[in-house]
Amino acid sequence: MRPTRSKDQAEARVIAARNRYMTWAALGVLGLIVTLALSTIARAAEHENIITSHGYSFYGELTYPEDYPHFDYVNPDAPKGGEIALGTVGTFDSVNPYSRKGRAAGLSSIMYENLFAEGINAAALPADTYAEYYCLLCERLEYDEGKNWVIFHMRPEARFSDGSPVTAHDIAFSHNLLLDQGLKSYADAVRKRIPNVEVLDDYRVKFYFTPGISRRSLISQVGNVPAWSKKWYEENDARLDEQRLTTSPGSGPYMIDSVDVNRRIVYKRNPDYWGKDLPVNKGRANFDKIRLEYFGDAEALFQGFLAGAYTIRSEGDSKKWSTGYNAPKVQNGSIVTKELPDGNPPVPTGMVYNLDSPVFADRRVREAIALGYNFEWTNASLQFGLFSQRKSFSEGTEVMATGTPEGAELAFLKGLGDIVPDALFNEDVRVPHTSNEARLFDRRNARKAMALLDEAGWTVGDDGMRRNADGQVLTVKFLTASTSSDTLTGVIENFASNVRKLGVDLRIEEVDSSQYTARRRDRDYDMIFFQYAAFQGTGTGLAQYYGSETSAFSLFNPAGLASPLVDAIIEASLLVETREEEVASVMALDRALRHELIMIPVWYNPNHWVAYYDMFEYPDPLPPFALGRLDFWWHNAEKEAELRASGALR
């Protein structure tokens, strides 16, 4: 449905013009009448270009009409009640997820809502559409057709958990708080695009956008800022960038129930939640409590699940999925294991190079190190053949680059000029090398790697180690966490073994979770097993992940990528006007990122692997873009009673 255009003022002005026409005609001033009437009609047409809607998408089309009763995929009659419990590895010493300081507890942003609705834990909402946003704290928004500004009309009934109203003052305060005390990469990007926010009255807030820049992501950006209580922050002299175990009141359906530092955190439903009956919330947030249990390592986490310490688990370890669930509770049906479809592109996970590390300045070194990874052997020997190798930053989507560029993508790249290297036009898009599944150390790839290292000036000495002209040994520090799964540890160790055979001093530096977090934030590593963001379209967020401007400090850019080519593609993609052009532009981005070789791509799974105690239910079919276990699953009280009576749950 296309958002409706506001015509009340326009029609009123036309009527007023007609009335003035009759009066002036009687006075015989026809020339003045015609001039003024045309001017008034022009102003009326101008007002017709103000768009008013219950939601937003960049291209103007919304799947759900203004009177939608609920999202199609939810069960609007899902019962409320019960508890869902998750497990995780590590520690926490804060409940403020917006600060670089400390380690925030999982799900600790769950209490806060935005002007636009989003899924629990910041999942996309709705989960069956792409890049559409629907009002939550706002009841409607209006913006000019050129998207130079937007006004959000807020719901007067919205309340924080302490009972105080959520107002336009809180929205403006929250926006400015993120700019003043939030992540620098975010603040720098937003200031350039959103120069001003104005509180028009208690329930109307207006954002202004910088002239002459892409209109992409501006309205969705301001609509997705968390709403914090200005009153609470001021009364408590609190800061957004501080580590703390107290929280400001949120307006969402959940609030903190209890905190046991480094052991568990429990969130409970707010019995007075103001928005429970809104169409955007029907069939969602169905659990009375959400509990998160902490464990010291991956094996303790898994055994805790089998023992009933928590009740649902998303599995990512192929060994566990293949062999670990041959347990009595699975065999007798107390625990259910399911493979559920996942319509999202897989997260671009892999072994990331720190491009600020001098040893990786030469692309040939990165190429050589990458040849030490044997996906085929790893998948067959350590991962039970359950995975496919990821090639793209948008694997399996319409924007995944293939072959050489053609059609709209070719035209887009040609439009960028000389900044695009010939290789992008003339060579097939980069894909991972293949390896011998039967042998961990693939001699064919090893020969290629050693030739590349020789070319790069790292020659082998009498001791088998590679040194440069200054006699420095080629040393690579690979940072890992002691809480990593046994499978991931095995993958990295076998990769390191292959690389060492090339004459590289690859050192695995295993540290505890707190040190790992600190060193990851400071980019104190040469390599790390981490991830980037998959994409299916363009947006200003791409610059935070892949752009040069914030590359020195962005937490979202673990490689520190600073590529003029990638910058040019992102900037040009933000200016496209149609979905066809958008697809072409981000296909070019996928091609360029693969060309830059910022990580060694590893594996992906096209499905969700889920294990849970047989007391949870979910809509069938699931929506394509979210598993929704915390969002729109629900609890069956009778089944839980049976599990407890049988002793399966303690």
Image (spheres, helix red, strand yellow):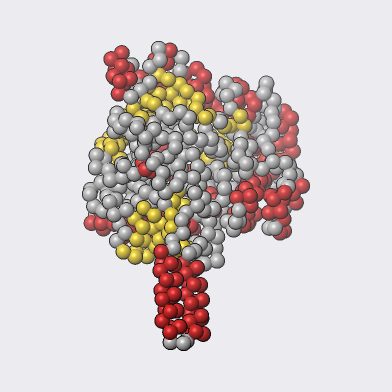
Q: Residue 133 placed where, x, y %?
A: 45, 48
Q: Nearer the viewer, residue 323 or 493?
A: 323
The residue depicted at 69 percent of the width and 49 percent of the height is: 409
Residue furthest toward the front? 26
Quadrant where the C terminus is found in the figure: top left
Residue 502 placement: quadrant: top right
The residue depicted at 29 percent of the width and 54 percent of the height is: 156
Q: Nearer the viewer, residue 348 or 56?
A: 56
Judge from the rendering whether residue 25 lies leftward or rightward of residue 449; answer left or right.
Answer: left
Compared with residue 436, is residue 282 higher up or lower down, i.e. above or below? below
Residue 119 placement: quadrant: top left
Q: Nearer the viewer, residue 577 or 140?
A: 140
The residue depicted at 41 percent of the width and 57 percent of the height is: 141
Q: Residue 379 placed where, x, y %?
A: 60, 25
Residue furthest toward the right? 426
Residue 22 placement: quadrant: bottom left
Total number of numbered discs in the rendering? 0
The residue depicted at 74 percent of the width and 30 percent of the height is: 444
